[in-house]
Amino acid sequence: MAKVLLPLADGCEELEAVTIIDVLRRAEIEVVVAGLKEGPVRASRGVTLVPDTTLDAALARGGFDAVVLPGGMGGTHALAADARVAALLKELAAAGKTVAALCAAPLVLAQAGLLTGRRFTAYPGVLTDADAGGTQTGAALETDGNVVTSRGPGTAMDFALTLVEVLRGRKTREEVEAGLVR
């Protein structure tokens, strides 16, 4: 079974986080939701989310096939400032594993040097090509090698389904998508 780490920080975009968690779990992907610190996370629209564990505890267990970052400006800035997140992103990317970010969170990938020379997309105005070292396409979704990016809350479902396909294959994506009645 594929294992994904989804780190959460105060100010994250709840629509994105919950959509990703739900869709990946429907595909029988183990999703470890880890708060940067102990306790609940207050998302950007005031929704309280309760992580499964802390980031330190999740990192101690390890074994991740992917790291997926939801957006939201507050959450993105907290993730970008966390050295543990940057180190894990770099480690997984170097091993050819999936690193993915939605909305404002491609900023975290850029700061870790993971968008250099790649096609990517992000929430409008968050990143420039010069900031990221890559080419922002403006597409709803981009996959360039092991890096998956998407634009924002409205693209969260397609982003999550793409991750299902990357981690479990086209057939599983189609099965999950059929159950969502899209």
Image: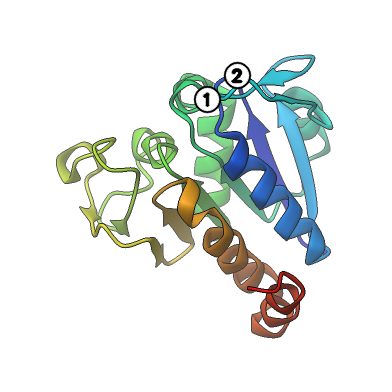
Estimate the x, y position of residue 66 in percent, counting from the top left.
64, 53
Which structural element holds mark 2? loop
Tag 1 residue: 75
Three-letter amino acid code at the position of disc 1: Gly
At mark 1, the secondary structure is helix
Q: Is residue 9 visible?
A: yes
How many other residues sit within 10 Å of disc 2, few (<14), some (14-19) or many (≥20)? many
Q: Is residue 32 above or below residue 163?
A: above
Q: Toward the viewer: 24 or 168?
A: 24
Quadrant containing the C terminus is: bottom right
Q: In the drawing, does residue 132 fall left or right of residue 158? A: left
Q: Which residue sits furthest front?
A: 181
- Residue 31 at x, y percent in the picture: 77, 48
Residue furthest toward the top?
Answer: 38
Q: Is residue 95 visible to the viewer in this orientation of the structure?
A: no
- Left or right of 176 on screen, residue 147: left
Residue farthest bottom in this picture: 171
- Nearer the observer, 159 or 1: 159
Q: Residue at x 61, y 46 (%)?
A: 67
Which residue is denoted by mark 2 in the rendering? 10
Q: Quadrant of the rendered structure where residue 13 is? A: top right
Q: Distance from label 1 to label 2 (Cα)?
A: 5 Å
Q: At 78% from the left edge and 42% from the top edge, which residue is drawn?
A: 32
Quadrant of residue 165 within the rendered picture: bottom right
Quadrant of residue 179 in the image? bottom right
Circle number at residue 171: none
Residue 172, given in percent of the width and then of the height, sits at 73, 78
Please state if 164 lies on the left or on the right of 143 as rendered: right
Mark 1 touching mark 2, by CB under 8 A? yes
Which residue is painted at 79% across and 15% down in the image? 39
* Kind of residue at disc 2: Asp
